Image: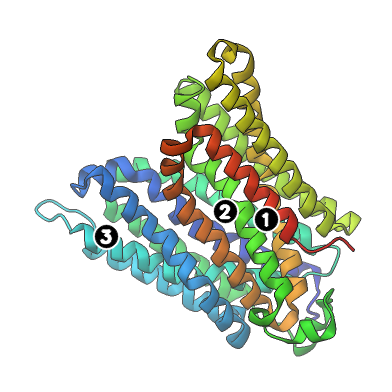
Amino acid sequence: MSVLQPSHRWKVLGVGFAANAGFAAALSGIPATAVVMRADYHLATAQIGTILGAMGLGVALSELPWGLLTDRLGDRRVLLAGLGLTGFVLALMAAFVAPIPGRVPPASALGAGLLLVGLIGGSVNGSSGRAIMVWFREGERGLAMSVRQVALPAGGALGALVLPSLAASAGFQAVYGVLALLCLAITALVWLWLSEPPPDATDTLRISATPRSATRSPLCNGQVWRMVVGLGALCIPQVAVLTFAAVFLHDVGGLGVAAISASIVAVQVGAVLGRLWSGRFTDRRNNRRPFLKGCALTTAALYATLGGLVAWVSLVPQHGALLLPLAMSALVIGGIVASSWHGIAYTELAIVAGSSHVGTALGLGNTFAFGAYFVTPLAIPLVVESLGWAGVWFIAAAAGGLAILLFPRIG
């Protein structure tokens, strides 16, 4: 069977999508149960943030080791081991770490379980990305990687929709059990559909870097480091919106629950459409690097505008009726733009690293991305307290500006 046989390529993409969506359902869905979790586990509000952050911390710590293993052992073995073990850990949590009548597990056990889920579940990101980069041709990879990245908001939305009501009605045994079954079902798809490509398959992965930089480890490649730091920096504005938009819209914009929900849904739907469009657009134009720099520039401009509008309103409150709608629009559009570039960045990162180092490079990129997901929510309350909301958005704009400087030169 040819490595580029169309029917099998789409099966590989389907496996990558399912793996990322399944893990995203846990990564985003479990935090959505926070209210029920706080009551069932008898937790203080301060404990919730630390416990829920454990999964993100686990992913950030494990991405690079999983990427190195992927380059050494191959996509199939890493995905089978990672998804299977994640399902096993979730099954153990359902049996021993879920509250039942007469037994409330300690917060330390819950935090340790979620940390372990993050450490093991981080395997899906780099390995599924490497598989897609190998099985798809140049001119198709941007769209394929963007489809894979769409799995994150899609799976997260599904988890956030289903798991809170499941926790409230059936308890956390059901939550962890359903997630375990989902992981094991996706493991079966990997077993059936994802095979290692023939030895000459990686020849299709054309390298844009020099031969010397393409053969050395990404850990010794300055261009790879510039990209992953830029990628992490551009995640900061996105994470700021995803985690604190609701608080900002309520406290500064004075919006109610319905309007806040509509704004966040608009950002998420726009992100999905933006990722799909950007993949197809850059495949047709072969302009990934200009697109990344343009996305970073637009993000920086929108968040600087948002910060300026908020600062203006804080200084001249009577202008709020005119300026706050503009600020809310800038927030939504900025959130969409800041969430539309991921597939393109990971595609270019894999090309720069070279065919034998894709897993390592993507793991390193995910380390910085999930590091931003972990650090940004912790930092925002401190910034709001000292600099106000305008300071938050100006710092987000500066992060976009840093990404402009770090992303590879055009050409």
Residue 45 lies in quadrant: top left
Mark 3: few, some, or many residues within 10 Å (few <14, many ≥20)? some
Give the spatial CA distance, label 2 vs label 1. Answer: 11 Å
Q: Residue at x 58, y 87 (%)?
A: 73
Along the line of sight, the residue nearer the viewer: 209 or 19: 209
Disc 2 to disc 1: CB gap under 8 Å: yes
Quadrant containing the N terminus is bottom right
Label 2 crowding class (10 Å Cα cut-off): few <14, some 14-19, many 20+?
A: many
Q: Quadrant of residue 130?
A: bottom right
Q: Of helix, strand and loop, which one carries label 1?
A: helix
Q: Secondary structure at mark 3?
A: helix
Q: Is residue 96 left or right of residue 152?
A: left
Mark 3, residue position:
110
Amino acid type at mark 2: Leu
Does 403 sit above or below residue 242?
below
**Does label 2 or label 1 sit earlier along the sequence?**
2
Q: For numbered disc 2, what is the local secondary structure?
A: helix
Q: Position of residue 46 (x, y in %)?
A: 27, 46
Instruction: Please name which of the two marks, 2 or 1, marks the residue nearer to the observer.
Output: 1
Image coordinates for residue 369, horizontal then vertical, percent: 57, 60
- Specify which label sits upstream in the sequence, 3 or 1: 3
271 relative position to 243: left or right: right
Query: In percent of the image, x 71 and y 49: which residue is there?
Result: 275
Q: Tell me, yes or no, if residue 184 can be seen here.
A: no
Examine the rendered structure and indicate whether residue 19 appears above or below residue 192: above
